[in-house]
Image: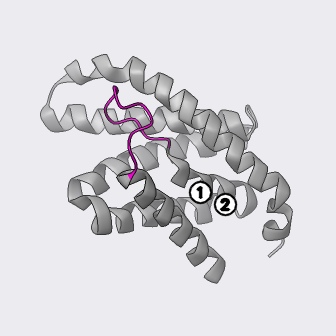
Amino acid sequence: MAFFGVFLALAMLVSYVERVAPSPVPAVPGIKLGLANIAPLFLMYTKGDRAAFGLNVLRCLLSGLLFTGVWGMLYALSGAVVSYGAMAAFRRARVFGVVGVSVIGGVCHNAGQLALAAATVRTARLFYYLPVLIISGVAAGVLVGYLAGLLIRRIGPSFSKR
């Protein structure tokens, strides 16, 4: 339980820092690196799907309550649930490594949030932004996957035995 709490606190801290930090691409609204996703990705590979999914959902709920409000929480959850389902499926299928699974997650996270936005405003016109979000999801997914992969290789074996 303490292990899970530490990872939840770290993920929330990173979420908050990303929220207050300037956008990595100021000319493109809504782009984030998603570094908080390192924690659930690490847990997915070391503790399994249930622990990682639980962490992801709790992080979205708590961050929403503390930092973004109800709509921010709903958008975070929509992206998290869609991306997590895809990442878990591709990890189990052993089609990609950590970076590939993270890229799938980054792209699906953006698609899930865009789908919620389109449903909320009742127009499919928002999907014009999908190519930008795919590119940013791939770039962020590579970075997050690389960093998570480093953690999994370096400290993962000692955590997966507990």
Residue 106, above or below 36? above
The number of numbered badges drawn on the structure is 2
* Residue linked to disc 2: 43
- Label 1: which secondary element: helix
Amino acid at circle 1? Pro
Q: Quadrant of the C terminus?
A: bottom right
Q: Nearer the viewer, residue 76 or 143?
A: 143
Would residue 6 be visible to someone looking at this image? Answer: yes
Q: Residue at 45% of width from left, 49% of height from top?
A: 80
> Residue 49 occupies which quadrant of the picture?
bottom right
Classify residue 15 by image quadrant: bottom left
153, above or below 158, in the image: above
Residue 98, horizontal then vertical, whole percent: 72, 41
According to the image, label 1 marks what residue? 40
Which residue is at the far bottom? 2
Horizontal placement of 100 versus 61: left or right? right
User: Which span of residues is magenta-colored?
Assistant: 21-33
Cβ–Cβ under 8 Å for marks 2 and 1: yes
Inspect this view and state whether residue 1 appears.
no
Label 2: few (<14), some (14–19) or many (≥20) C-alpha neighbours in 10 Å:
many
Residue shown at 68% from the left, 33% from the top: 100
In the rendered view, does 8 fall on the left or right side of 58? right
Is residue 32 found inside the magenta-colored segment of the image? yes
- Please give the name of the residue rendered at 24% of the width and 36% of the height, measured from the top-left corner: 117
* Spatial separation of the CA atoms under disc 2 and disc 1: 5 Å
Q: Position of residue 47 (x, y in %)?
A: 71, 64
Name the element at disc 2. Answer: helix
**Which residue occupies 50% across, 41% down?**
33
Q: Is residue 56 magenta?
A: no
Going by the numbered disc 2, the residue's amino acid type is: Leu
Task: Using the image, determine if residue 134 lies above or below residue 24.
Answer: above
State the quadrant of the N terminus: bottom right
